[in-house]
Image (cartoon, rainbow, N blue to C red):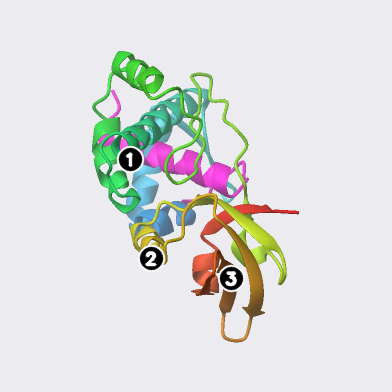
């Protein structure tokens, strides 16, 4: 039997692995994500290892086992499908999706989830642009190029943003949405600022925010 906390850890290990394109995740990366002490994270990793949900290689890192991967895909699939439902059908603003989806994902039966998935038209991405895994764990391609890594005079299309409430509130205030295209007019590395222009609006963003926006260069 897996409890909610264990499911959350498994999901985060999966997300960090995919996000950072790494096969192994260090326990310190998990600590930073949750804001937990190294000791509490290490204790949880031992519990997950005893349940054969993760593999731990000393001094190298942590990876999910085949069973752990199945659990992670089930949780992420449920979370992102609920985010689509809450956003599209109940008009929740995207900065308020995560908390409710987090609760619902743990209480959703496989039968309910599949009915919800088909009801929504089998969406491929959630409201923040993250891909929704299919039952086998296959996903659509996800863009990993950060706005912060683009160059001046590039046209950048935002296709994915981090699921960070403060970021999403900020983007709402600036009327910046998924699939908007912006021209990068200036990058000020010294002051850590990037200037973008789109649809008669200019925005000044910190490079920290630009590191949380992903997409592709439009030719």
Tag 1–tag 2 contact (CB < 8 Å): no
Query: Badge 2: how crowded within 10 Å, few (<14), some, or many (20+)?
Result: few
| Relative image position of residue 195 (x, y in whole percent) | 58, 75
Mark sitting on residue 168: none
Q: CA distance from mark 1 to mark 3?
A: 27 Å
Residue annotated with mark 2: 170
Q: Residue furthest top?
A: 111
Query: Badge 3: how crowded within 10 Å, few (<14), some, or many (20+)?
Result: many
Magenta: main secondary structure equals: helix
Residue annotated with mark 3: 196
Tell me the SS state at disc 3: strand
Q: CA distance from mark 1 to mark 2?
A: 18 Å
Tell me the SS state at disc 1: helix
Residue found at x 40% / y 18%: 118
Q: Is residue 58 visible?
A: no
Query: Badge 1: how crowded within 10 Å, few (<14), some, or many (20+)?
Result: some
Tag 1–tag 3 contact (CB < 8 Å): no
Location of residue 191 with respect to 53 vertically, above or below: below
Which residue occupies the foreground of this view, 24 or 151?
A: 151
Work out which quarter of the rendered image holds the C terminus and state it.
Answer: bottom right
Work out which quarter of the rendered image holds the N terminus and state it.
Answer: top left
Which of marks 2 and 1 precedes in the sequence?
1
Camera-near label (2 vs 3) is 3
Range of residues picked out in magenta: 1-27
Residue found at x 53% / y 58%: 213
Residue annotated with mark 1: 87
**In which quarter of the view is residue 78 placed?**
top left
């Amino acid at each position: 039997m897996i409890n909610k906390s264990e499911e959350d850890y498994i999901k985060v290990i999966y997300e960090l692995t995919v996000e950072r394109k790494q096969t192994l995740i260090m326990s310190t990366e998990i600590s930073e994500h949750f804001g937990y002490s190294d000791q509490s994270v290490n204790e949880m990793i031992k519990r997950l290892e005893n349940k054969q949900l993760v593999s731990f290689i000393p001094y190298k890192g942590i990876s999910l086992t085949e069973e752990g991967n199945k659990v992670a895909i089930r949780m992420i699939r449920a979370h992102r499908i609920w985010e689509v439902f809450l956003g599209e059908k109940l008009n929740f603003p995207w900065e308020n999706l995560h908390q409710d989806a987090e609760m619902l994902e743990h209480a959703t039966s496989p039968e309910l989830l599949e009915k919800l998935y088909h009801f929504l038209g089998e969406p491929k991405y959630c409201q923040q642009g993250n891909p929704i895994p299919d039952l086998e764990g296959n996903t659509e391609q996800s863009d990993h190029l950060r706005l912060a890594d683009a160059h001046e005079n590039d046209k950048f299309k935002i296709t994915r943003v981090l699921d960070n409430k403060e970021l999403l509130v900020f983007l709402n205030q600036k009327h910046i949405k998924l699939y908007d295209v912006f021209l990068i007019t200036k990058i000020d590395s010294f002051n850590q600022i990037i200037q973008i222009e789109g649809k008669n609006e200019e925005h000044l963003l910190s490079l920290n925010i630009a590191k949380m926006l992903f997409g592709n260069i439009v030719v």
